[in-house]
Image (cartoon, rainbow, N blue to C red):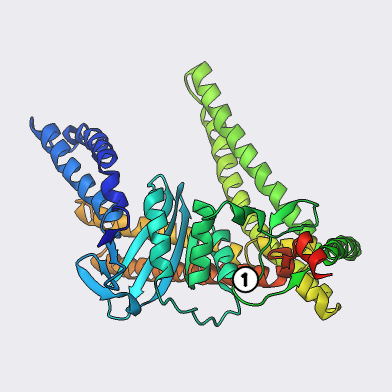
Amino acid sequence: MTRIGRNPGLRRLPLAIVVSAGGAVAIGLQMPRIFDAPSAVPIGIAVSFVFLLVLIFCAAVLPYGLLSWDERAGTATFGRRTVPLATITRVVRSVSAAGGVVSIVYRFFSTDGPSVRVLVAGRPMKGIDQEALTELRRFIRALPIVEPPRTDGLTDEQSAVVDAMSDVGGRSSVGKRLLLEELEAILGPEHPSDLMNTPQMPTPGGTLTPAAHADAGKAGPVLSAQEATALAEQWERDDRDAAAYLADKRIAAAIVRRVFFWVTVLAVVVAAGAIVAGVVIETTHGWVDSDTNDLLGIALVGCGVVGGLSYFGWCAAADAHVRRLQALGRAWLDSRDLEQRTRGLAPELLAAWTQPAPGTRLIRAVCYVTASLSGLALIAVPVIITTEEDILTPAALLWTTIIAIVVLGLSIVGFVVTARARREARQQFVLLAGWRLMPPKVEPAAEVEGAG
């Protein structure tokens, strides 16, 4: 059996111990404020250290298992289970990018049931080393991974782009070709001569990028150098046509969006000025008279209300603006021939699909407010119950809890719905981009001359 890397969580165990110790000391020093006992600090540190270490262990170690394989025997070991290589037909590629944590994970599935995750690359938790990556490439080549069926009309490369465009990442089933191409991009070509055979093509900006197309593993479109040059020139003409097309369109939502934006900014500035004025007055005079205090209070409350309402207005106007821009982009594309769809939508029109999907800004803003209020209500209920004063009746507390749970659940549903809508918008972006995003291959000049 040849093991492919080590568990990334175990590799970072010394760092986990240091982080747990630091957090435990910080928590333990606060224990005397809660428990009036001489042993509160050492017990708090000990309990906190164990809790934090177990928490980090569960989050960083348990998701990843041991992967080994025996090429001659045709078997692989997922943790404690051994499965035939012939049963490993599905791989899910996950990309995470949230809170400064970035990772690329491959999860291998066996038709016998077990699966195993491999952290290919990541930050701050590092993936497997170069030797293990090389062995992983050999392992993938030996697997009978099937091309996943797709209902969204995307290729593996396009689906990977959709995942990468997300603020938090994504996951999708992929075929063998994409996995090997990604590992080759990380490790580099196996033979130096491969670098000389990598076809390239000019982009509209004039730079050279490695060629890729929607179906690199099959007989995809291949352009000659002259055709690639003509394509770049056509892209430039498309850009000019799109700019002239947009210049003739007036979008009222864009003006409303700009007005709400500046009203929101003004409300924040005035509120900040009121806070600074109150601090300065209290610092210089040692007190704030009632009239001034009332005036500052009215300014803060008024700015809060105006700023909140204008922000919701900005969200609604921004959603309307993006919806209109996308409609214009589709109309421009519908008025042109099939070759235009292949070349891709002009970037100036395509930019509408790089913004949050229409409707999601306002829904998320509402969900943030309702989730926060319902969460505060759920925290407040047990506090009220423990107080000696009967602020609310038991029936009122029960109804408050039920309503808060329902509202919190609806808020979570809203976040899920908007996340799906934004992923669908990213899928549309990839499809509408066409060759702009994934240009076809270009025949090397030597091959073109030889063919002639």
> Relative to residue 52, is residue 247 depicted above or below?
below
Which quadrant of the structure image shows residue 316? Answer: bottom right
- Front-lying residue, 329 or 289: 329
Q: Quadrant of the C terminus?
A: bottom right
315 vs 43, left or right, is right
Q: Residue at x 37, y 55 (%)?
A: 376
- Front-lying residue, 186 or 165: 186
Q: Where is residue 374 in the image (x, y as percent from the top left)?
A: 39, 61
Which quadrant of the structure image shows residue 73? Answer: bottom left
Q: Mark 1 points at which residue?
A: 216
Secondary structure of the residue carrying tag 1 is: loop
Q: Which residue is drawn at 37% across and 47% down?
A: 125
Q: Is residue 355 visible?
A: yes
Amino acid residing under circle 1: Ala
Q: Residue at x 26, y 75 (%)?
A: 83
> Relative to residue 380, is residue 400 depicted above or below?
below
359 vs 39, left or right, is right
Which quadrant of the structure image shows residue 46? Answer: top left
Q: Quadrant of the N terminus?
A: bottom left
Q: Where is residue 260 in the image (x, y as percent from the top left)?
A: 71, 53
Q: Residue at x 21, y 31 (%)?
A: 29
